[in-house]
Amino acid sequence: MIEPKAAVDRLRAAFGGPDHHRTLHAKGRFYAGTFTATPEAAELGRALHLNGEPVPVVVRWSNAGGNADVPDKKPDIRGMAVKFRLPDGSSTDLLGQTARRFPTDSPEDFIAMTEASRKPALVPLFMLRHPGMAGAMLDGLRSKAVAPHRSFAEPTYYPIHAYGWRDVGDRLSWVRYSFVPQGVASPARAFDGPDRLFDEMAARLAQGPVRFDVRLQVAGAGDDPHRATSVWKQAREVLGGTIEVTDELPDQDPMIFDPTRVVDGIELSDDPILRYRPLAYGESINRRT
Ligand code: HEM
């Protein structure tokens, strides 16, 4: 397994971003809102933020690249990181991005793919050499996960990994999430400046809240929760709740979103990508704080 320090060195070299920014998702802003779970979510999970009472959230929308000076019109994956603040003072994080399939279970392959994506002419060659990754990479292009998006409020975001939810009787369900926009009318004005995604969000929030459904896939028999690449065939869909974003916040850094930060009632899988992420994020955080 690639050392986290080497991984962060390579990712930073690929983007040439300065040390005081995140290694990936360098350009982003923070927003305040709430999350309210449905009764179906409360039945599946005993974690305190699932009890149906609204809890505060902090959202960070971002461009996936590691250079914060790149204008928003450049095609990219977008990120939506959400920190749920529980009534007991603890918190738990979900980090979504616009690609619905993750192409590999190997951190090293992910680093190599990110490096290759910096030279678009080489991407077809990369896919030929990594045929197992090509399907998810092509899906990302076809589904417009990588695109010159015009709004952070329009794409669906996928946190990818499965998490184990324990109910009050300690029964375990494996759950995957998607954040699906509720389709609010876009602002009348078009935005074209270098920060057009953030300007557009400011105009939207001036009109009212921006809402996302939190949809859940609940694994069925034979669905594998321990690999980021697994496709679930037996899952059922449940509406888990709503994220309602109301205001932009001032810079909250050094805020950390960590996909392994869980609370009582939520468990981590053995997914090697999930288990690797806090090591790489820790290295990135050390350099940016
Ligand atoms: C081996 C796989 C991965 C590596 C090495 C990696 C690496 C990183 C690093 C180094 C950061 C910056 C952390 C910081 O300074 O706080 C980051 C941020 C981020 N990553 Fe990943 N990542 C991986 C997989 C994923 C996956 C699977 C997702 C989504 C499902 C994801 C979504 C994000 C998001 C949304 C952020 C920005 C968080 C924020 O706004 O603070 N990453 N990633």
Image: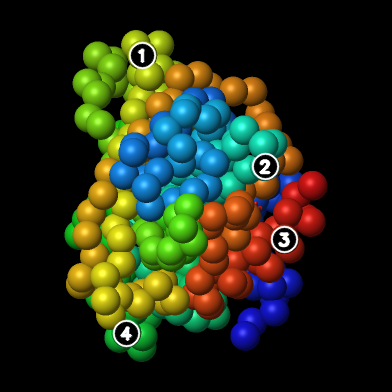
* Residue located 36% across and 25% down the image: 210
Can you say whether 71 is above or below 187 in the image? Answer: below
Q: Which residue is most to the front?
A: 169
Residue 282, numbered circle: 3
Cα–Cα gap, marks 1 and 4: 43 Å
Query: Residue 132's mark?
Result: 4
Q: Which amino acid type is marked by label 3?
A: Gly
Question: What x and y, as percent, mark residue 128?
Answer: 30, 85
Q: Which residue is mark 1?
A: 208
Label 4 vs label 3, nearer the camera? 3
Front position among marks 4 and 2 = 2
Ligand 1's quadrant is bottom right
The residue lying at 39 percent from left, 63 percent from top is: 173
Amino acid type, callout 2: Ser
Relative side of 234 to 94, left or right = left
Q: Residues within 10 Å of mark 2 (few under 14, many from 20)?
A: few
